[in-house]
Structure formats: C-alpha cells, structure tokens
Amino acid sequence: MNKEKIREAVTQLLDGIGHPKDDPNITETPDRVAKMFIDIMNGYNEDPSKHLKLFPSDNKEMVIVRNVPFYSYCAHHLQPFYGKLTIGYIPDGKVLGLSKLVRISRVFAKRLQLQEDLTKQIAEFIFKNLNCRGAAVNIKSQHMCMVVRGVRSYGAETVTTKFMGIFEGDQGRELRDQFLSNTSDKEGY
Ligand code: ZN
C-alpha cells in the first residue's frame, strides 16, 4: 500500500469539499486517515491461506461459527458496512481451528467489497481449501452508504447467503434449513 498516495488523496479531498485549510483540526488528518486505511484495508496484504490450520477429524456433522462481528468497506462508496456473519461447513476428514474461520473471513472483509462478493469469497475459500463436503456463509449487515445518503434507510439490513457443495440443490434443502436456523439474529446489532 502506498501511504503517500493516500495522504495526498485525503489532502485533495479536504480541499475539494472546501473545508477551511487553516483549521488546526485537519493538520494531521491526511496522515491519520492514511494510517487508518493501511489498517482497515490490510486484507490486500494478507493471504488467507496462512490461517489454514487443519486437524484430522472423523466428525461429519455441520460445524457452525455464528454471529461473528465484522466490518468491511463498500467498494461503491468507500463507506463501512458491518454486522454479523455466520460460517458453516461439513467436514470430510479435516476440521479447521474455529478461530481460523473468523481470521479467514477478516482477510476478505479488510478489502473494498460488495457484500455479495464477500459472502461468496469466504464460502469458496473454505470449500476449496478444506476439501469439505459443503460450505455455507450468511452475512447480515447495515450499509452506511444506505444510511447517510441515497435512501437513508437506518436499520435496513442486507442479507446475503452462499451455499456450496452438498448444501446446494434439492438434496441440500435440509442442510440449508439447518444452517439458516442458526442465522436468525433477533437482538439486532
Ligand atoms: Zn455502498
């Protein structure tokens, strides 16, 4: 990542929106925002494969880690979207350390994303790299680009789901229901 370029862009942005140049509050803003972007977009520098800590297991039942808080940034507006994600998979000889599911999802979340793509990328990565029988991801989130602008819909949730392997098709209906019954979040955020 190029910190200098980000810093310059923020200076231009402040100039573009017409904020008074002599405001002492913005003296360090370009530097501060550049540092922030390097942190929140760190997923570009990370290979999710480094979190593939697999253990042998004869468990063939669905494993679910649910209601994992996440933060990501919308590729259309550079605004945050955030909420909860639930990841499930059906192992086939190997299981992944549970915290690694969270870490893998964070690598993808710390990039500019569309929620639909984020959902798909996590599911595909798990399905391919665990050689499991099926993978499922559900994301429920609030998009700040829908709150502060446009339709200004505070509280509107966007829900996306991706199913792979034996979760798919007619024979996967029961598994999908089992997974989705773990994703209802009545407490909100
Ligand atoms: Zn957006």
Image (cartoon, rainbow, N blue to C red):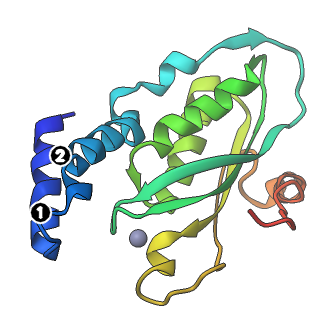
Q: Please state if 121 lies on the left or on the right of 100 as rendered.
A: left
Image spot of residue 16 (x, y percent): 11, 72
State how far apart marks 1 and 2 are (Cα). 21 Å
Vertically, is 187 above or below 7?
Answer: below
Label 1 Cα neighbours within 10 Å, binned few <14 / some 14-19 / many ≥20: few
Q: Quadrant of ligand 1?
A: bottom left
State the mark number for residue 121. Answer: none
Determine the secondary structure under disc 1.
Answer: loop
What residue is at 60 percent from the left and 81 percent from the top? 154
Vertically, is 188 above or below 125?
Answer: below
Q: Please state if 133 lies on the left or on the right of 149 as rendered.
A: right
What residue is at 54 percent from the left and 50 percent from the top? 71
Q: Looking at the picture, which amino acid does disc 1 mark?
A: Asp
The residue most toward the top is 56
Image spot of residue 102 (x, y percent): 65, 34
- Using the rendered view, name the quadrant where residue 126 is placed: top right
The answer to whether marks 1 and 2 mark residues whose Cβ atoms lie closer than 8 Å is no
State the mark number for residue 22. Answer: 1
What residue is at 38 percent from the left and 36 percent from the top? 39
Closer to viewer: mark 1 or mark 2: 1
